[in-house]
Image: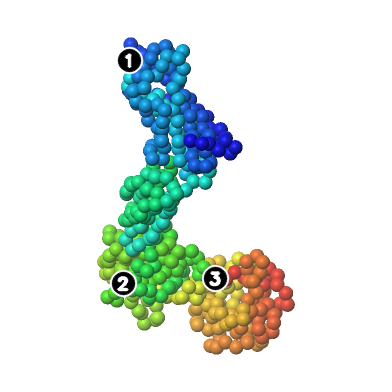
Amino acid sequence: MHLNRKLAAVVAALLGTVGVGVVASPANAAIKPVIAGTAICDEDSSSWVVTWTVTNPTETPVAIRQVFAVPVAPVTTFTGIAVGDVLPPASEGSLTGTTVVHSYLPKVASFLAIGLADSTLSTRAQVNLPTVCGTPVKPTVTFESRCDDLLVSVAMPANGYTVPIEVWGTDAMESSFVAEPGAAVRSVPVPSDKAASVKVNIGGVGTVAQSKWAYPASCLPPSAGTFQLFAQANYRYVEADQLDVAASALATSSFGTRFEFRDVGSGDVAIRSVDDSRFLTVAAGDGSVNLGPVRVLGVAEKFRVVGNADGTTSLRSELNGKFVTAERAGQEPLVANRTAIGPWEKFSRYAPNAGPRPIDALINDNYVTAESAGKKPLIANRATAGLWEFFFVQDLGNGEVSLKSLVNGKYVCADHAGKDPLIANRTAVGPWETFKVVKNADGSVSFQSKVNGRYVTAESAGKKPLIANRTAIGPWEKFYTFG
């Protein structure tokens, strides 16, 4: 082989030798050959060329019974030393062999093992090939997630080399074959339950591509809408994470609070977490509701949506016929174990970010409340958020919003054109009920009343009711809205 000597460089050296095989008895001490190797890069062929010398440390000639090179063919070709050759005495010199290793990945090791006829032992030497040599032609690999599997397709371009291909699923090898240059594409379907991690390896070299199966949107049941579920048990949003599904989120922006309702027929829905791409499932034993499979497998993932007279909805599991409850008023995760509907089994469905949220005053870190269920002015003096502390922040366009109290369904008003404190007692939106949202650099917001252009303040650091009477923004005029 002609080597591009200008570009080639010696980049690897012998690391050591290791004996393998059955240990010989002391009475028949075996000859242990000395193997040394050096490697240079032939950039023209994108191959490492490793030159090996095998030396007999004694004056006793011995036949060679085994020659083994790694990576194995067809990635590697080895010439110069063969089974049956005689390893001459030390005084007569060494045998020389050459390994040509087609380069595909960095940090590959080239091994040579030599076994002699006087022993079952083999002696092995290693040369590291630390970088990719030249510009190798690699196999092309594509992955296609289908409803039931991940289709892995592999082909070697016509100007490449023959390579052994291994397709590995999550726990085991699914297929192995030889990819010939210019040959037709080979495709391997990896079942979805074995495709959480799929790797395509060149045998003896390493991984050239990897992916995982994802449930295609085209395979999902038809959408019946995307919602956030607001529990009446504790006025918290249902959120799903790796541990459990619980009514525990204050913010409409919280991760895991958006759910797709998918129509699975016969009046049932399957509920899929938007953020986790998995369906809620009910455990057969205790009825606990958890994040489950990425597809609808059976009745454990099916629910019947029941409309209640107060506008809320309840969810009945088709697995056990029980209603989903926010156990212990939301202190524990959701579970499907109720035979009747009460407050804990009721949920309001809202479009994402359209539901009610608390408003927290920056100055004292207390929640704003519609005092006395809205009969008294708003004041920031609550340590926890309940029914009186939730408001709909309704977008009016042009950066303006209205605030609607959850407790009485009334709009917050800058009463008497802002001369009196804010109170939730209006049934319609006008200038007194309109506020411009000003976003502050620290992530908080301020509310500017449309009727007088003044900013809403938590008067006296929250000790007095909110009122729109400030001309500038300071700590008293900053709020968090959990959106």
Q: Which mark is residue 25?
A: 1
Q: Which residue is mark 2?
A: 264
- What amino acid type is highlighted by mark number 2? Val
Q: Closer to the N terminus: mark 3 or mark 2?
A: 2
4 left or right of 472 in image: left
- Between the C-alphas of marks 1 and 2, the distance is 72 Å
Q: Dot 2, crowdedness within 10 Å: few (<14), some or many (≥20)?
A: some
Q: Which of the two labelled residues, at mark 1 and mark 3, occupies the earlier sequence position?
A: 1
The residue positioned 50% from the left and 78% from the top of the image is: 406
Residue closer to the observer: 439 or 123 = 123
Do the numbered discs 3 and 2 sit on residues whose CB atoms are within 8 Å?
Answer: no
Residue 204's x, y, as percent?
A: 40, 40
Identified at 38% across, 60% down, the residue is 144
Task: Name the mark nearer the viewer: 1 or 2.
Answer: 1
Q: Can you see residue 308?
A: yes
Q: Position of residue 320 (x, y in %)?
A: 26, 66
Above or below, comparing residue 147 to residue 436 in the picture? above
| Colouring mode (rainbow / by chain / secondary structure / one colour) | rainbow
- Give the image quarter of residue 84: top left
Question: Up-down: is 422 above or below 220?
Answer: below
Specify which label sits upstream in the sequence, 1 or 2.
1
* Frontmost residue, 210 versus 339: 210
Residue 253, given in percent of the width and then of the height, sits at 51, 68
Q: Residues within 10 Å of mark 1 (few under 14, many from 20)?
A: few
Q: Is residue 330 visible?
A: no
Q: CA distance from mark 3 to mark 2?
A: 31 Å
- Crowdedness of circle 3 by 10 Å Cα count: few (<14), some, many (20+)? some
The residue under the point 28% across, 69% down is 318
Disc 3 marks which amino acid?
Answer: Gly
Q: Mark 3 = which residue?
A: 483
